[in-house]
Image (tube, rainbow, N blue to C red):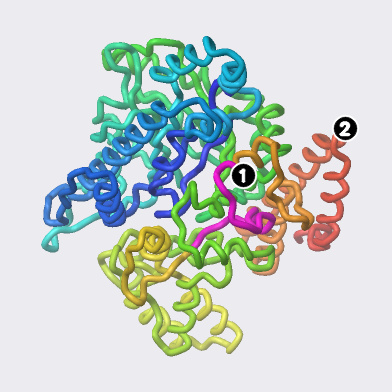
């Protein structure tokens, strides 16, 4: 990425709804963001709102249409593209005078931007101002309207009791919807490798170079380590599909589902990418060029390039710059802090205040997700409050209306959701029939009823922010990462961007740990919990725990060497953190 022209940060996907229309808000200012493609019904509701607002025709896509999910995705993305194009056209008509939208565009840019320098010079010369205005008409960079598909969310669908072909699975249909849209952007694939979904990509021309050697739709892989990037990148390259970016996310992540490693810390992972990027490029390039030749496809117009980006827990300009400069990142993702920026995300006022007031003790690593994957959350969210009140009244589980997270087959032939009434009724009856101690029963009960209806909860805040009110049971699930604790007020887009680039400070005055140590703290908590629960007679569990501990200590050694010369404060903080975990001194016998 050319940071002299563009922003050096992007806004990752945040829940199902919080960034669903973020491109409309930030793309005209050159800021890239990511839309979730999980909820097609939510897209239909928001599309109708925007069509009315911008006087565009709206025709609903009925769920009676055979390929309604893909058609809804395509219609929504085309609408977003149209609205962004309209707003960019209006911005280009703006003057370069102080207070104009075009002036705001340049004001938001990093201070090292050559565009910003040209703007500053144009304020002193009419000729330069006219030249810049002419340049803007054809060359002004616009933020990318990227989309995200969680590969795990590829549920089988049915019609009239009959299983539909694989291309009608949730992720497959969402992919088809994006592929058929007019967007020129990127598909972010997350949540692990899916060979069948990767194979499905081969069906769409936009993922291959056109007659000019340009790829209209690029592929971004969200990965947790170098090996995963190498394996997946080579697999796709062998199909003639080039991965243009590898997006590395820390265990702390940007909110929502967290996919912790086996104790391998963020710093060492980034270091491996820094040292091995050429290997990644060369390996994938060889497989890609062989596949292009074999399939007789167009060649790329230029040498294949790979961007390496990072995200998860970043909170200061020093951390941002360290990732850019030391690890040679091409961009840095800022997720959770943008939850406090209504100019960038869609969030209701009550939830916004809840997040602004949240402190460290309020943000927690939960078991809310029916996927069984750790999920970042905050105490006091309205969906959790309703869930707990219902459980207290003996009403366990939620009505499963959207069905995106139906994966469990313990009691049924067709998968159901572990947050549903149907599942929790049977699971609670099962544990009642077991001869459990009161303590064991309480622990099992808490785990069962903790599952929450994310399908509804992660979209309600968006709808409320648009004035769309649902039923009384439509409450908010919110998914901030722990980094939110140090941002304690609503911010404008400009205030947040100025914070990223070091032109202002939006952190409150409480001590904030370095992003690397905040992640380490999480892994030490995980180790402590696993040590308490491990069956040391089980050779596999014991081996995994020993490997986890070794990985953490390897990370400690790496950080001590990394910061020894230039940041002794981090070393002191690291030692203090380790002293709080005497469990680390115990040998696993």
Q: Is residue 109 above or below residue 138?
A: below
Query: Which residue does the image show at 22% across and 56% down from the upper left?
Result: 157
Q: In this view, does 442 lie to the left or right of 583?
A: left
Rendered location of residue 504, percent (x, y): 70, 41
Mark drawn on residue 58: none
Residue 138: which quarter of the image?
top left
Provide the residue designation for mark 1: 495
Classify 10 Å Cα crowding around label 2: few (below 14), some (14-19), many (20 and above): few
Q: Exactly how many numbered labels are in the figure?
A: 2
Rendered location of residue 260, percent (x, y): 59, 51
Rendered location of residue 345, percent (x, y): 47, 50
Q: Pick whichever, 544 or 233, lies toward us.
A: 233
| Nearer mark to the viewer, of 2 and 1 | 1
Rendered location of residue 89, percent (x, y): 35, 29
Provide the residue designation for mark 2: 565
Of callouts 2 and 1, the N-terminal one: 1
Magenta residue span: 478-494
Residue 144: which quarter of the image?
top left
Which element is circle 1 on? helix
Query: Which residue does the image show at 57% across and 33% down from the upper left?
Result: 108
State whether residue 389 appears in this view.
yes
Q: Is residue 393 left or right of residue 126?
A: left
Q: Is residue 541 above or below residue 235?
A: below
State whether residue 536 appears in this view.
no
């Amino acid at each position: 990425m050319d940071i002299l022209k563009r922003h050096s940060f992007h806004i990752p996907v945040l829940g199902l709804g919080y960034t669903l229309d973020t491109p409309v808000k930030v793309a005209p200012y050159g800021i890239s963001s990511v839309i979730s493609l999980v909820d097609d019904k939510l897209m239909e509701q928001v599309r109708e709102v925007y069509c009315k607002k911008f006087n565009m025709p709206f025709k609903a896509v009925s769920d009676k249409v055979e390929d309604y999910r893909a058609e809804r995705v395509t219609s929504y993305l085309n609408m977003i593209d149209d609205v962004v194009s309209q707003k960019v056209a209006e911005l280009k008509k703006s003057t370069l005078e102080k207070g104009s939208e075009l002036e705001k565009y340049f004001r938001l840019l990093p201070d090292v931007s050559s565009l910003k320098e040209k703007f500053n010079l144009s304020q002193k010369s009419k000729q330069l101002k006219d030249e810049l205005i002419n340049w803007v008409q054809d060359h002004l960079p616009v933020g990318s309207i990227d989309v995200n598909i969680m590969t795990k969310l590829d549920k089988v669908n049915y019609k009239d009791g009959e299983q539909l072909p694989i291309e009608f699975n949730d992720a497959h249909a969402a992919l088809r919807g994006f592929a058929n849209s007019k967007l020129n952007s990127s598909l972010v694939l997350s949540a692990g490798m899916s060979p069948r979904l990767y194979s499905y990509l081969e069906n769409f021309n936009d993922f291959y170079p056109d007659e000019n050697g340009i790829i209209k739709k690029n592929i971004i892989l969200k990965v947790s380590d170098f090996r995963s990037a190498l394996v997946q990148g080579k697999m796709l390259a062998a199909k003639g599909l080039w991965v243009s970016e590898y997006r590395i996310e820390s265990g702390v992540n940007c909110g929502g589902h967290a996919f912790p490693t086996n104790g391998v810390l963020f710093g060492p992972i980034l270091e491996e990418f820094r040292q091995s990027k050429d290997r990644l490029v060369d390996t994938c390039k060889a497989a890609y060029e062989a596949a292009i030749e074999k399939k007789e496809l167009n060649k790329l117009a230029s040498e294949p390039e790979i961007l390496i980006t990072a995200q998860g827990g970043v909170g200061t300009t020093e951390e941002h710059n360290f990732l850019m400069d030391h690890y040679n990142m091409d961009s840095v993702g800022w997720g959770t802090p943008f939850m406090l920026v209504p100019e960038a995300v869609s969030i209701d006022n009550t939830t916004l205040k809840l997040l602004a007031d949240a402190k460290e003790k309020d943000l927690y690593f939960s078991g809310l997700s029916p996927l069984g994957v750790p999920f970042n959350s905050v105490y006091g969210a309205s969906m959790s409050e309703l869930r707990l009140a219902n459980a207290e009244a003996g009403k366990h589980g939620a009505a499963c209306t959207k069905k995106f997270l139906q994966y469990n087959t313990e009691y049924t032939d067709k998968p159901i959701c572990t947050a549903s009434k149907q599942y929790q009724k049977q699971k609670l009856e099962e544990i009642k029939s077991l001869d459990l101690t009161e303590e064991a029963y309480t622990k099992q009960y808490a785990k069962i009823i903790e599952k929450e209806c994310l399908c509804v909860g992660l979209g309600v805040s968006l709808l409320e922010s648009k004035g769309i009110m649902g039923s009384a049971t439509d409450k908010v699930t919110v998914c901030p990462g722990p980094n939110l604790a140090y941002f304690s007020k609503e911010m404008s887009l400009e205030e947040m961007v100025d914070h990223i680039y070091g032109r202002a400070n939006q952190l409150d005055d409480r001590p904030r740990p370095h992003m690397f140590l905040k992640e380490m703290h999480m892994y030490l908590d995980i180790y402590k919990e696993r040590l308490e629960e491990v069956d040391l007679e089980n050779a596999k569990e014991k081996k995994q725990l020993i490997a986890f501990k070794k990985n953490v200590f390897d990370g400690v050694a790496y950080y001590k060497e990394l910061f020894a010369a230039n940041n002794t404060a981090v070393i002191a903080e690291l030692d203090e953190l380790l002293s709080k975990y005497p469990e680390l001194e115990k040998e696993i016998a």
